[in-house]
Amino acid sequence: GAGVSQSPSNKVTEKGKDVELRCDPISGHTALYWYRQSLGQGLEFLIYFQGNSAPDKSGLPSDRFSAERTGGSVSTLTIQRTQQEDSAVYLCASSSIQIGVAGYTFGSGTRLTVV
Amino acid sequence: QKEVEQDPGPLSVPEGAIVSLNCTYSNSAFQYFMWYRQYSRKGPELLMYTYSSGNKEDGRFTAQVDKSSKYISLFIRDSQPSDSATYLCAMTLYNQGGKLIFGQGTELSVKP
């Protein structure tokens, strides 16, 4: 597609439930990133994919968080047993390895609210 | 202490003013410096990108990097109400796979 697409745009879930957030990157972009933006905060790195591999998952806050990428395209971020502190906007970005950081494009994010 | 520090504001200026936004950082190894603009309920969009030290100009926007002081700036000339947004600085190393370290963001409001 023309841009990075994320779904759902908004998600309200009960504490303790599992959620899946989807990211559809720009076609041909090999690198894919997940960030989290809490209220009034900057972006916090979660995980990075190159193709289907995740060379850097150092930002995942706990083992309740996991992510996968299939076919070098769509990625899913899963949060198990959600907690109120997981409430945030989850942003996905993609980039071509040739362009690198200069070609980073973000989606509009998924706004997660845990009640 | 955070790796990248940015005053969250909010900053309010009249239309036509010159705006100065700044970030300081602690890791002297950072080589790539970026400014992103984020409108409400949207993802950040890349505004300016600079490699190493120096100045870069694009229309009304000028980005400056002073690696000796570990300080970066974004200047907006002739500010417009449409410039009202949150501005985030970001930086990275060449071997980090594109992982960016962001400042907290500065909320800017340009009043007509």
Image (cartoon, coloured by chain):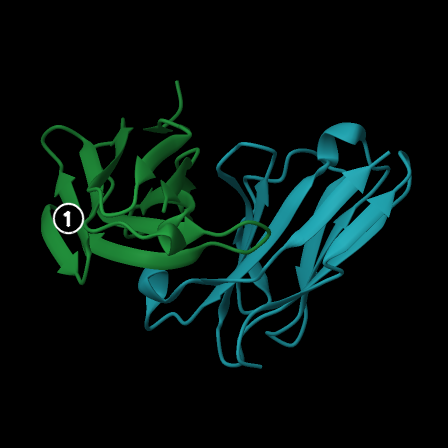
Chain colours: A cyan, B green
Image quadrant assignment for residue A5 = bottom right
Give the residue at the far top of this rendering.
B1
Q: Nearer the viewer, residue B89 or B75?
A: B75
Residue A77 vs residue B50: left or right?
A: right
Residue A64 vs residue A99: left or right?
A: right
Q: Is residue B97 shown to the viewer in this render?
A: no
Q: Nearer the viewer, residue A3 or B17?
A: B17
Q: Is residue A40 above or below residue A106?
A: above
Residue A61 vs residue A63: left or right?
A: left
* Residue at the image position 30 percent from the left and 50 percent from the top: B34
Q: Chain of mark 1?
A: B
* Residue at the image position 22 percent from the left and 42 percent from the top: B17
- Label count reads 1
Q: Position of residue B31 (x, y in %)?
A: 21, 46
* Residue at the image position 80 percent from the left and 50 percent from the top: A11
- Disc 1 marks a residue whose amino acid type is Ser
Helix, strand or loop status at disc 1: loop
Q: Position of residue A55 (x, y in %)?
A: 51, 54
Image quadrant assignment for residue B26 = top left
* Residue at the image position 91 percent from the left and 42 percent from the top: A17
Give the residue at the far front of this rendering.
B112
Q: Is residue A76 above or below residue A90?
A: below
Q: Position of residue B86 (x, y in %)?
A: 43, 43
Residue wearing tag 1: B52
Q: Is residue A65 shown to the viewer in this render?
A: yes
Quarter the N terminus of chain B occupies: top left
Mark 1: few, some, or many residues within 10 Å (few <14, many ≥20)? some
Q: Position of residue A99 (x, y in %)?
A: 32, 70
